[in-house]
Amino acid sequence: MRIAIIGLPQSGKTTLFDALTGRQDDPGAYAAPGSVQVGVAHVRDPRVAAIAEIVKPRKTTYAAIEFVDLAGLFATERPDPDSAGALRDADGLVKVLRAFENPGVPPHKGAVDARRDLEEIDSDLFILDLDILERRIERLRVSVKKPTPRQEGEKVELALLERCHAHLQAHGSLSRFAATAEEEKALKCFCFLTQKPSAIVVNIGETQIGDGAAALACLGQRHEPTLAVAAAIEKELLALDPAERAPFLQDLGLAELSAQKVLAAVLAALDQITFFTAGEKELRAWLIPRGTTAVEAAGCVHTDLARGFIRAEVISAADFLQFGGWKDCRSHGKERLEGRDYVVQDGDVINIRFSV
C-alpha cells in the first residue's frame, strides 16, 4: 500500500514523513521540485506481539505502509500535471495542514489558516482531475465520429466520463461518484486524485499539544479521518531511545508518539483490515480491503495459495489469544473451515490449505 503525503509549502509535510518513517534528514537540505522521497512505516498492531507470545515464531513481521513525499507539487500557483503523476500511483493521500506558528518559517500566503489551505489543496486536486477529464473527453468526441472497431466502446467511455465531468463540476470531487463495478474498473486507469481516500493531519506546535481539538475545529465537519499532530516534536522524540523518550512524552502529556494514530487514520480512510498468518516459521500481519474473500487473501500471501486453494482454517484473534493457539482453539471448537468465498474479518488468524 502506498500513501502520498501532500501539503502546501511550509506545512511540515516532510517533517511528518520523517516522523512516520523514521528518516533523519539534514534540516538544511531541501529536495528538488518533483523529487520523490519514499519511506516505510510499520503498523504496530498489539495483537501481533500477543500472538507471538503464543506461537513463538522464528520471525515476526508487522504490516507495512509505504509513504511518498513529493517535493514542490504545490509550490506554484498551478500544480504541474507531470509532477502529479507520482500522486496518481498512490492508493491514498494524507493532507497536511499547517496550524503552528513559527516566526522563522513564514506561513503560506502570510498567515496560518488551515481551512484555507485545505480548500486550496482540494481545489488543486480538482483542477488536476478536471484537466485529465477534459483532455480525454475532447479526444473521444472526435474519435467516436469515426467508424472503427473501438467506436462503440469509446461511446460508452465518453458517456461515463461526461457523467464524471458533471459530478466533478457540481461537487468538486469524485469521491462519491456513483458507478457500477464495471464502471469503477474502467475509471481505475485514470487514477483520479479527488477519488482517492484521504486522511487529514493538522500540524500543530508544541504549545498546542493537548488542545488539538481547537486546531481541528476550524475545519468543520469532514468525512475524512482527521487528527492533530505536532510533527516537529514527534520527529525529535523519535530520534531518542525509548527510555530517554518516556519522560519527554510524560511532560508533554502524551501516552505515546502519534505515528500509530496516523497509520490508523490511513487504514480507516482506505477501509483496510488486518488478518494474520501464524506458524513456527513466521507470524505476519497482512492488510487487505474490507470485503476481501478468503481466496483473494490467500493470493496476497502467495499466488500458489490462491491457485490451489482448498479451504481456510480460521480462528478469530480474540479466541486465539483466549484459548492459547491452534491446538486449544480446535479442541474448544473455535476453529472454522471456510471456503474460497468467505469474507475475511478483521483479526482473523488464517491457515490456508492448498494443493498445486
Image (cartoon, grey):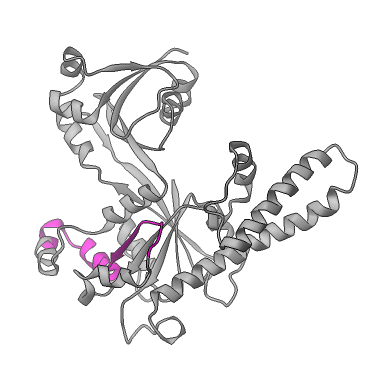
Residue at coordinates 40% horizontally, 82% vertically from top-left? 107
Above or below 272: residue 220: below
User: Picture quarter containing residue 138?
Assistant: bottom right
Q: Position of residue 263 (x, y in %)?
A: 32, 52
Which range is magenta?
221-245
Q: Nearer the viewer, residue 342 or 66?
A: 342
Residue at coordinates 25% horizontally, 68% vertically from top-left? 212
Above or below 302: residue 133: below
For the N terminus, give its image quadrant.
Answer: top left
Query: Is residue 237 rendered magenta in the image?
Result: yes
Q: Nearer the viewer, residue 275 or 334?
A: 334
Above or below 146: residue 35: below
Q: Position of residue 92 (x, y in %)?
A: 46, 52
Residue 261 left/right relative to 83: left
Q: Nearer the viewer, residue 22 or 268?
A: 268
For residue 50, say whether it is visible: yes
Q: Position of residue 114 (x, y in %)?
A: 39, 74
Number of marks? 0
Q: Position of residue 32 (x, y in %)?
A: 51, 71
User: Picture quarter containing residue 111?
Assistant: bottom left
